[in-house]
Amino acid sequence: MAATQLVDRFGRVIDYVRISVTDRCDFRCVYCMDEEMTFLPRAEILSLEEIYRVANAFTQLGVKKIRLTGGEPLIRRDVLSLVQRLGALKGLQELALTTNGSQLGEMAGELRRANVSRLNISLDTLQADRFTQLTRTGKLNQVLRGIEAAQKAGFKRTKINAVILKGRNDDEVLDLVDFARAQHLDLSFIEEMPLGVISEHNRAEAYCSSDELREMIEERYALLPLSDNTGGPSRYYRMQDSEIRIGFISPHSHNFCGDCNRVRLTVEGRLLLCLGNEHSVDLKALLRGGITDTDLQAEIVRAMNIKPERHYFNNAEPPQILRFMNMTGG
Ligand code: SAM
Ligand code: SF4
């Protein structure tokens, strides 16, 4: 294989892969999962060895950044052994992790030592009772302890992710900003996406646009746009009197598909070319059919030809995408 860069039909270079290591989670966030969820049988999800082979193939093809996500990645048994192997991959510049923070109290130090460079921690509210309502099973204190452990372990530029829902936590936008400023954490607000059918709220009614949230913040703090581009649907701002960055992840209201630099590996081994479409290649079948590493790389190169140009999300319509976020990895 001569290719050292993945390029799709629209000339976009793909150098970032998000990997969902499990569909399971210790929380049941109202926008992500239904209260009663059926998870995949173990045989249907990629083994840690299979995930490693795919990650290795991607780094051979020029991928510089891998993010582990889920479900809750830190509740998969032996996940640290995978993290340690990925952290040693040649050519990988950034190994990041998105987590709900529940296990960080115990695991932050080991993750840091395994070369995880960045953490995103989800936190939608600072009120304990509301936290348990939004996550259905989570405890705020445990996550706050996790955040503290991450800071102590030496993680830099840790980012809080918050999904804001009208009538549930939209009154906490400024509290979250002040928390992030006090704790020296970056903070991103994510627009809710119509992934999977949920029962607890109407996504159209709960929808808060990034523009609304930005206006709320600008009533107290000036936001100065940054030119950083992560190749995703995010835009970042800084403040005059703080080093933290505030981001807005706007898959609905702003479309940045033209800059997309990423693909995803779902928990059952589908290489998913776009979060908002179903174009995918079944890598699990290839792996279990005995494919060689060289042919695996060739299949990944070929998959770039079906990466869609863009996605369309509309919370007012029945979801087009029936998979939940925990399958895909947010
Ligand atoms: N369990 C980990 C966590 O919560 O950070 C990682 C997986 S979770 C699916 C990744 C991110 O997706 C979280 O920040 C979560 O808030 C976000 N998320 C889940 N469902 C979403 C949805 N329907 N729309 C927008 N963001 C969503
Ligand atoms: Fe679990 Fe993360 Fe989904 Fe919440 S958002 S249910 S923590 S996977």
Image (cartoon, rainbow, N blue to C red):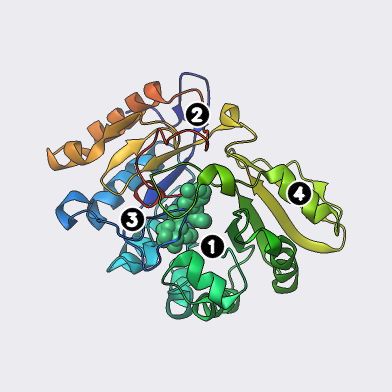
Residue 115 can be seen, yes or no: no
Instruction: Work out whether mark 2 precedes mark 1 in sequence or the reverse, and give the earlier one.
Output: 1
Residue 229: x percent and y percent? 66, 40
Q: State the mark number for residue 235.
A: none
Residue 147 can be seen, yes or no: yes
Residue 309: x percent and y percent? 50, 22
Q: Residue at x 40, y 32 (%)?
A: 320
Q: Which-is-in-front pick, marks 1 and 4?
A: 4
Q: Which amino acid, mark 4?
A: Arg
Q: Give yes or no for contact between labels 3 and 1 (Cβ–Cβ under 8 Å).
A: no
Provide the residue designation for mark 1: 122
Neighbourhood count class around disc 1 (C-alpha, 10 Å): few under 14, some 14–19, many 20 upward:
many
CA gap, disc 2 to disc 3? Answer: 24 Å
Q: Is mark 1 within 8 Å of ligand 1?
A: yes
Residue 179: x percent and y percent? 70, 71
Q: State the mark number for residue 311.
A: 2
Instruction: Work out whether mark 3 precedes mark 4 in sequence or the reverse, and give the earlier one.
Output: 3
Neighbourhood count class around disc 4 (C-alpha, 10 Å): few under 14, some 14–19, many 20 upward:
some
Q: Is mark 4 within 8 Å of ligand 1?
A: no
Q: Which amino acid, mark 1?
A: Ser
Q: Residue at x 28, y 29 (%)?
A: 299
Q: State the mark number for residue 21.
A: 3
Q: Of helix, strand and loop, which one carries label 3?
A: loop
Which one is nearer the viewer's eye here, 304 or 21? Answer: 21
Q: Residue at x 37, y 56 (%)?
A: 34
Report the quarter where the N terminus lies: top left
Q: Which-is-in-front pick, marks 3 and 1?
A: 1
Q: Which amino acid, mark 3?
A: Val
Taking the image as shown, residue 123 lies to the left or right of residue 6, namely: right
Furthest toward the top, the residue is: 9
Provide the residue designation for mark 4: 214
Instruction: Work out whether mark 2 precedes mark 3 in sequence or the reverse, and give the earlier one.
Output: 3
